[in-house]
Image (cartoon, helix red, strand yellow):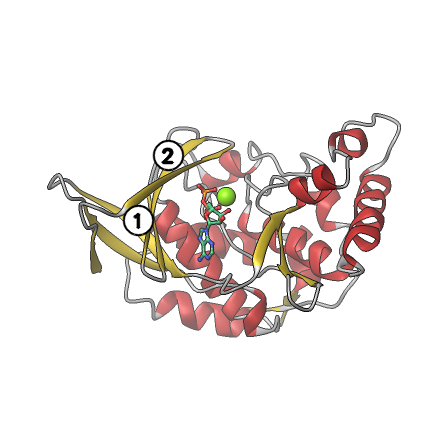
Amino acid sequence: MERMIIPSDAELIISTSSKGDQSKWLIGNTWVKENNRGYENIAEYVAFLILDSSNLPKTSFIPYTPCIIKKSDGTVTEGCYSNDFRGSLQEVTLERLFEVNFETTDDILGNGRYSTEDKFNAVLEKVHLFTGQDVSLEISQMLAFDAFILNEDRHTNNILFLYNPITAVWKLAPIFDNGLSLLSDLKDYPMSKPIDILKKKVKAKPFNSSFKKQLALYKGAPFINRKLLLNRVTESPYDLGRAKEVVMSQLNDAHLQGIIIG
Ligand SMILES: Nc1ncnc2c1ncn2[C@@H]1O[C@H](COP(=O)(O)OP(=O)(O)O)[C@@H](O)[C@H]1O
Ligand SMILES: [Mg+2]
């Protein structure tokens, strides 16, 4: 595994996920993220392999690489890194997009009278109004991917838009932050318990806690190529541990066959 040495003057960024803080450093153009609860780095890498084995455009997700992190105090941990995807564009999370328009996603997501589909349509209609972009297919496809990786962290700050202040054009940011998935949280999903039992415990976000309900929002064609994915996980230079077993289990899961090619 590659080694990333954190310079003593590197800026430490702590952002809060739904499961607490993961330390992060921006070094030059590279974002380094430390594991916090388990094998987030391997989950992030395998999630990337899945996307890279799909027919999604290569620009619609970012590559992550597992690494060893050597901190300036001498401690050594594990994590992963990615290259900055913003460039000169401004990032605005889905939550912030609502805020700057004097609205909140809570009004929609917390509305008990709405079905999952109602919530999805209402949020995506607002996004269209605020940005001029119809990203329903892309977002529903991301949620279908989340169902495959059992992502428990797709909150409204992990869906991101990029704004070009010169052209005033919006676009959806690439899919990122997929590390709280594939049962990577060893505190909640101990290695001693069977995968089939643990899979049932994981809760989805942000439209429904059921992965099946969110998966049903996707009306497009299958997009994850089974053969390519099997090759990638088999030939991985890293020990993928349980993440590989979860992928195998998902590839055989009856509910997910509608998004798998072959
Ligand atoms: N490759 C990247 N390019 C641009 N910004 C990034 C990148 N990785 C992380 N960030 C920034 O750091 C924030 C937190 O990163 P994220 O991967 O979501 O970690 P966390 O698990 O802490 O939420 C993101 O919302 C984004 O602002
Ligand atoms: Mg995040």
Name the disc covering residue 35, or none. none
Q: Quadrant of the N terminus?
A: bottom left
Instruction: Residue at 44%, 64% (x, y): give it.
Output: 63
Between 102 and 148, the one lying in front of the other is 102
What amino acid type is highlighted by mark number 2? Leu
Where does the image place residue 13, in percent across and percent down from the top left? 37, 41
Where does the image place residue 194, in percent across and percent down from the top left? 44, 37
Q: Is residue 197 above or below residue 97?
A: above
Q: Is mark 2 within 8 Å of ligand 1?
A: no
SS at badge 2: loop
Instruction: Residue at 55%, 45% (x, y): give it.
Output: 150
**Quadrant of res 106:** top right
Mark 1 crowd level (few <14, some 14–19, many ≥20, 10 Å Cα): many
Where does the image place residue 79, in percent across and percent down from the top left? 30, 49
| Pointers 1 and 2 in contact (C-beta within 8 Å) | no
Where does the image place residue 58, in percent across and percent down from the top left? 55, 73
Return the residue at label 2: 186
Mark found first going from the N terminus, 1 or 2 = 1
**Quadrant of res 140:** bottom right
Q: Is residue 144 left or right of residue 27?
A: right
Instruction: Residue at 69%, 69% (x, y): give it.
Output: 167
Between 64 and 106, the one lying in front of the other is 106
Return the residue at label 1: 79
